[in-house]
Amino acid sequence: MILIDGKKEAANLRLELKKEVLALKAKYNKVPGLTVILIGDLAPSQIYVRNKEKSAKEVGLKSEVIKYPSNVEEKTILNKIDELNKDDTVSGILVQLPLPKHIDKKKVIETIIPEKDVDGFHPVNVGNLSSGYESSVPCTPLGCYLLIKKMEPNLSGKKAVVVGRSNLNGKPMTQLLLKENCTVTITHSKTKDLKEECLKGDIVVAAVGIPELVKGDWIKKDAIVIDVGINKIDKGIVGDVAFDEVSKIAKAITPVPGGVGPMTIACLLKNTVECFKRSQR
Ligand code: GUN
């Protein structure tokens, strides 16, 4: 069994990006910039944002975090996004989710211009991805995709099963696998005979948010298993895959933590660099 080392792959990707940022700086005399907006004081969001800032600086991006209290008015956020949309030194804008209830997530996402939408959440980017055109791709599925490609460069004709249909993970993951000519089955918490569906997968991506849902006898021998879950339970943090069982069957599996997580942040930096490059064309 191969333990897919997301930490190592993310470090490799950051190193590549660092070199690319240096080359861009030499060519354009400026570097890509990432601005993150953080509203409120949720602990997980604060940790994510701190990690994003640290990684962005490590690869040489211009990095800025703008913080607001949880009672900030929606208009203040939308005005700030408008300002950042027009700022040439800002290549990518990310508003950390979840948002306080009085702020409309859809409005916030749609105010960021698609060209600076490093999350790939804007409907224009969602549409472009689904049509197979160039777009920003949500960071977590992009990270999963890069890990899968590393394990199996030719995915054509492979059977892929995605467990979970969220806009954040499941749906964009499906689009990326389809683009690689996989035969993709999208399943979710209401799917009948989920076990039988998973057993068909050469590749199984679990992104459903149910702790240790995918069991050892749900997985075909020699499958590649990618675990997007981060679930807090009594014994600690676990994924959506029962790791101890599945790791005895699968050809390769991502651990939680240390699998998909580190790749997500590295892919955010990648998206920022891509946005910058597109803005220079
Ligand atoms: N909160 C948790 N994951 C994400 C993400 O990928 N993007 C944003 N904007 N917020 C998040």
Image: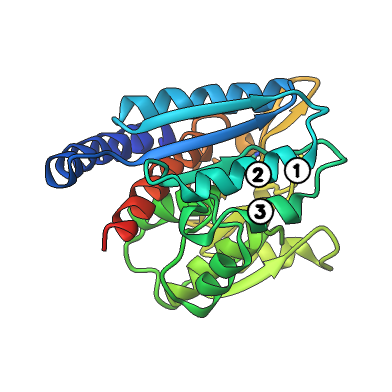
Which comes before the other along the chain, label 3 or label 2?
2
Q: Is residue 134 left or right of residue 191?
A: left
Q: CA distance from mark 1 to mark 2?
A: 6 Å
Q: CA distance from mark 3 to mark 2?
A: 13 Å
Looking at the picture, does residue 243 appear above or below residue 182? above
Q: Which colour style is shown?
A: rainbow
Q: Is residue 167 visible?
A: yes
Image point 70% across, 47% down: which residue?
215
Looking at the picture, does residue 156 appear above or below residue 222? below
Dot 3 alpha-carbon crowd within 10 angstroms: few under 14, some 14 to 19, many 20 or more: many
Type of amino acid under label 3: Ile
- Secondary structure, mark 2, is helix
Q: Nearer the viewer, mark 3 or mark 2?
A: 2
Q: CA distance from mark 1 to mark 3?
A: 13 Å
Task: Specify the quadrant that holds the C terminus.
Answer: bottom left
Near-viewer residue (202 or 226): 226
Type of amino acid under label 2: Asn
Near-viewer residue (227 or 95): 95
Residue 105 position within the rendered picture, expressed as x and y whole percent measured from the top left? 75, 50
Q: Which residue is tagged 1?
A: 75
Is mark 1 in CB contact (under 8 Å) with mark 2? yes
- Quadrant containing ligand 1 reads top right
Residue 244 position within the rendered picture, expressed as x and y whole percent measured from the top left? 62, 34
Dot 2 alpha-carbon crowd within 10 angstroms: few under 14, some 14 to 19, many 20 or more: few
Type of amino acid under label 1: Lys
Is mark 3 in CB contact (under 8 Å) with mark 2? no
Q: Is mark 2 within 8 Å of ligand 1?
A: no
Q: Which residue is tagged 2?
A: 79
* Marker disc for residue 109: 3
